Image (cartoon, rainbow, N blue to C red):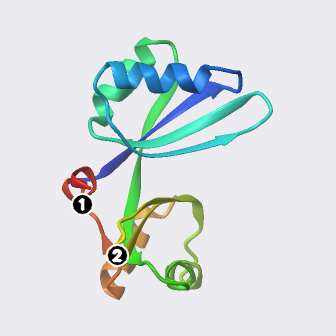
């Protein structure tokens, strides 16, 4: 099963992030991972949530512009240089990363990263061949 990321465009105004996160919380949607990037007038909230389709319906119904995207959650050793090895692997195979963000560090020697590329199938195949652990949706939602 693919891991879906909720992407929501929000105004870059005081309280808009509070409104969105409260809306999701009030509807029982748990935020597992969250990243916010902004410009002068708007931001993009990218998040992994337990029920992405339900979350999408909720935010669209509330008037937000939103969509779901497939992302790749990977596990790397939580030590210096581990992420750069994965990025090097992608770069040396001409796979361009659109964005990535840290998902979690569990204190058990592993770190989790969410990434997106336009070459998703190629990246997944490469990760499989090179032994990079791609988390399943079940693994992600159980963290």
Q: Is residue 44 left or right of residue 79?
A: right
Query: Callout 2: 10 Å neighbours few (<14), some, many (20+)?
Result: few
Q: Of circles 1 and 2, which is in front?
A: 1
Q: CA distance from mark 1 to mark 2?
A: 15 Å
Res 128 quadrant in image: bottom left
Query: Residue 42: x and y, percent?
Result: 70, 29
Query: Residue 70: x and y, percent?
Result: 39, 50
Picture mark count: 2
Query: Residue 3: x and y, percent?
Result: 32, 51
Q: Which mark is residue 6?
A: none
Q: Counting residues from the N terminus, which is met first, the one under dot 1 or under dot 2?
A: 2
Q: Is residue 59 above or below residue 129?
A: above
| Residue picked out by circle 1 | 136
Q: Residue furthest top?
A: 62
The residue sitting at 35% across, 66% down in the picture is: 106
Can residue 85 be seen in this snapshot?
A: no
Q: Is residue 18 above or below residue 97?
A: above
The C terminus: image quadrant: bottom left
Label 1's element? loop
Q: Is residue 102 above or below residue 16?
A: below
The residue sitting at 38% across, 68% down in the picture is: 74
Q: Is residue 117 above or below residue 17?
A: below
Can residue 27 be seen in this snapshot?
A: yes
Label 2's element? helix
Res 134 quadrant in image: bottom left
Q: Which mark is residue 125?
A: 2
Query: Residue 56: x and y, percent?
Result: 38, 27
């Amino acid at each position: 099963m693919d891991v879906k990321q909720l992407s929501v465009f929000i105004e870059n105004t005081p309280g808009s992030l509070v409104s969105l996160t409260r809306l999701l919380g009030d509807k029982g949607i748990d935020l597992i991972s969250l990243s916010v990037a902004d410009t002068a007038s708007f931001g993009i909230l990218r998040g992994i949530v337990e029920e992405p389709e339900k979350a999408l319906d909720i935010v669209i119904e509330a008037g937000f512009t939103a969509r779901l995207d497939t992302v790749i959650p990977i596990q790397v050793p939580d030590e210096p240089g581990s992420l750069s090895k994965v990025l090097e692997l992608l770069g040396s195979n001409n796979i361009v990363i659109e964005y990535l963000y840290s998902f979690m560090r569990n204190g058990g020697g592993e770190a989790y990263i969410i990434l997106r590329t336009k070459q998703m199938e190629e990246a997944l195949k490469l990760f499989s061949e090179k032994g990079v652990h791609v988390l399943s949706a079940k693994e992600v939602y159980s963290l």
